[in-house]
Image (tube, rainbow, N blue to C red):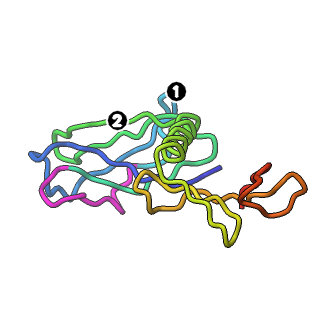
């Protein structure tokens, strides 16, 4: 499945305020995938040398994002990309939030609500039911993701 991810690179403050930063995608076998991208790249904080872009990854892409400063003698930085690793990372983050964040049972809706570690951002909601399948918050037998 193709999708976009926000990626960042930190070249350090000595490379701050550049208008020439770009990136290329290279497949795991080292083959260039597309051309150098310079549009849509912004500096996260003026003068910081930290740049960010929404990078488009095609279906089944495995490889690297190779950033460069675009100067006559460029500085390079790379980051590996694997959809499997990103999926694992997302799962770990979700598990961390589920276990570390607030849990709340809403007796009016018979829902159990899970929040991120900030205890305010909802990340999951489940209907609670008794053994007969009736909504319940007292004799909970089953939960179903809403």
Secondary structure beneath label 2: strand
Q: Residue 132 in the image: state x and y as whole percent.
A: 90, 56
Q: Quadrant of residue 124?
A: bottom right
The alpha-carbon separation of the residues under discs 2 and 1 comes to: 15 Å
Q: Earlier in the sequence, mark 2 or mark 1?
A: 1
Which residue is depicted at the point 64% across and 60% down?
125
Is residue 11 shown in magenta? no
Q: Residue 22 in the image: state x and y as whole percent.
A: 31, 50
Which residue is depicted at the point 52% across and 38% down?
92
Q: Residue 50 in the image: state x and y as whole percent.
A: 22, 50
Q: Which residue is mark 1?
A: 29
133 and 31: which is toward the camera: 133
Q: Which residue is mark 2?
A: 78
In this view, 24 is above or below 42 = above
Which residue is depicted at the point 15% across and 52% down?
48
From this viewpoint, which residue is outermost toward the top?
A: 29
108 and 62: which is toward the camera: 108
In this view, 75 is above or below 139 = above
Is residue 46 shown in magenta? yes
51 and 101: which is toward the camera: 101
Q: Closer to us: mark 2 or mark 1?
A: 2
Which residue is depicted at the point 37% across and 56% down?
53
Secondary structure beneath label 1: loop
Quadrant of the frame with the C terminus: bottom right
Q: Which residues are magenta?
A: 36-49
């Amino acid at each position: 499945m193709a999708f976009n991810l926000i990626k960042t690179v930190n070249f350090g403050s000595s490379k701050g305020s550049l208008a020439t930063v770009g990136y290329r995608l290279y497949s795991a076998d080292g083959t260039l995938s597309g051309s150098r991208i310079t549009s849509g790249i912004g500096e996260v904080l003026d003068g910081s040398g930290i740049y960010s872009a929404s990078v488009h990854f095609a279906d089944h892409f495995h490889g690297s994002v190779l950033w460069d400063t675009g100067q006559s003698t460029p500085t390079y930085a790379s980051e590996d990309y694997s959809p499997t690793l990103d999926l694992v990372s997302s799962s770990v983050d979700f598990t961390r939030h589920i276990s570390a964040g607030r849990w709340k049972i809403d007796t009016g809706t018979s829902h159990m609500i899970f929040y991120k570690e900030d205890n305010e951002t909802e990340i999951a909601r489940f209907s609670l039911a008794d053994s007969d399948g009736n909504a319940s918050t007292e004799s909970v037998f089953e939960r179903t993701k809403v």
